[in-house]
Amino acid sequence: MRWFGFGFNAFGQIYAHEKLFNGKSSDAVKEVKAISPIELAAHVDRRDSCMKIQIRASWSRRITLHWDDDCCVRVAGCGTDNESCSVSVEESRGCKDALISESYLTIAFPDRIESWHLQKEEKTPSWSMKIKPESPGPPLTLPLVPGGYIATKPPFYRTLSSHLKARSLALSVEHAMLLTASGAVYTWGMGSHGQLGHGGLTSEEEPRAVEALWGMPMSCVATGGWHSVCISDGGDLYVWGWNESGQLGLPSRGLRKAVQQQQHSPQTGAACQGTSTSPGEEPQEGEKHEEVFISIQAFPALLDITPACEVRTVSCGSRHTAAVTTTGDLYTWGWGDYGQLGHQTLISSDEPQCVEFFREQEMRVVDVVCGAWNTFVAVIKDEVV
């Protein structure tokens, strides 16, 4: 399995560079924005292609988990070098999972949880907690831990009712989404952009079931900066929350106005031709045409991806979304100013579009992980029968 990254690279999260900025050279722009998918060669041992590798990402950092007989964590980003972090590989050895945020690296071991402050040179973790062995059943993955979950900032440990029977948990900066063993979805936290899916803009202090999805079992949940996404057992995609940058895949007035302004700009007009997000031609006299734009979608909405396909997994950045289909294709939409959509442009889109790069390279996408402004994709060789 091989991993590729594209989008925001100012801290070397995708590939390392010697200097963050090089005067006013165009090379600095290339280092900040990885427009084309780039293979993450660092820390990947090509002699062991069977080693399971997983990526986690924040705004300025990316960690690589090597899941073999003795799992360890390696950090990229943090600064201008590729391994600037207070936690060494040896200190993480033997872990079973890890999470990264802007301030903390949280590592799960079989008997404890540790959170290390990334901006302080400390020889011991800032916080730790002993945990009991998990009960029989599927193993929990971070941020879930026995009896609760680990937050991105203190207090780290938060309890969850055992009645929820949590299966997975997605955390954004301001809200959370929980998937239960039965496929029900619960949300809580800030709701100012409709990201909780309850039909309003109010916040919730405790987990509350998303009633619009009741009776439709879900298999995967993901949270962005101010939007939420989930996948049904049948492979349907549901979206809700803020759509200012088209991150829901629904028509965005702000996004289309911005694209229209770019097209009419003398400097950028030629470069922006061909974008699928540009408004249609102006209606002729006597024609009536009024498109419905969505700024906030406070209830879950079914999102159709054309051509019709089933979605296998999904991930959200701050203002973009990426989904992998059961056929191994990657679709992205939303904000694209750093190339995080993978279409080898800086164009945003409020319509899901297939990332042709992997098709052209005869690669099958099997997983996707979004950082705030970038995207990481796992692929295997597409075997043609």
Image: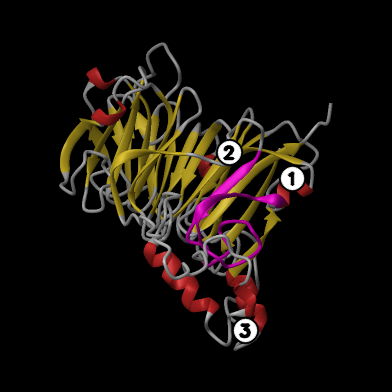
Residue ID for mark 3: 22
Looking at the picture, how far across and down is residue 276, in whole percent?
Answer: 57, 60
How far separated are the C-alphas under marks 1 and 3? 34 Å
Residue ID for mark 1: 359
Give the residue furthest to the front. Answer: 286
Instruction: Report if the CB atoms under discs 1 and 2 are less than 8 Å apart.
Output: no
Q: Secondary structure at mark 1?
A: helix
Q: Which mark is residue 324?
A: 2
Q: Secondary structure at mark 3?
A: loop
Dot placed on the residue nearer the N-terminal end, 1 or 2: 2
How far separated are the C-alphas under marks 1 and 2? 13 Å
Report the front residue among 41 and 219. 219
Looking at the picture, how far across and down is residue 292, in whole percent?
Answer: 35, 55
Looking at the picture, how far across and down is residue 179, in whole percent?
Answer: 35, 28
Q: Is residue 328 visible?
A: yes
Dot placed on the residue nearer the N-terminal end, 1 or 3: 3
Quadrant assignment, res 324: top right
Q: Assess disc 2: are there few (<14), some (14-19) or many (≥20) residues with their C-alpha within 10 Å of its C-alpha.
A: many
How far separated are the C-alphas under marks 2 and 3? 36 Å
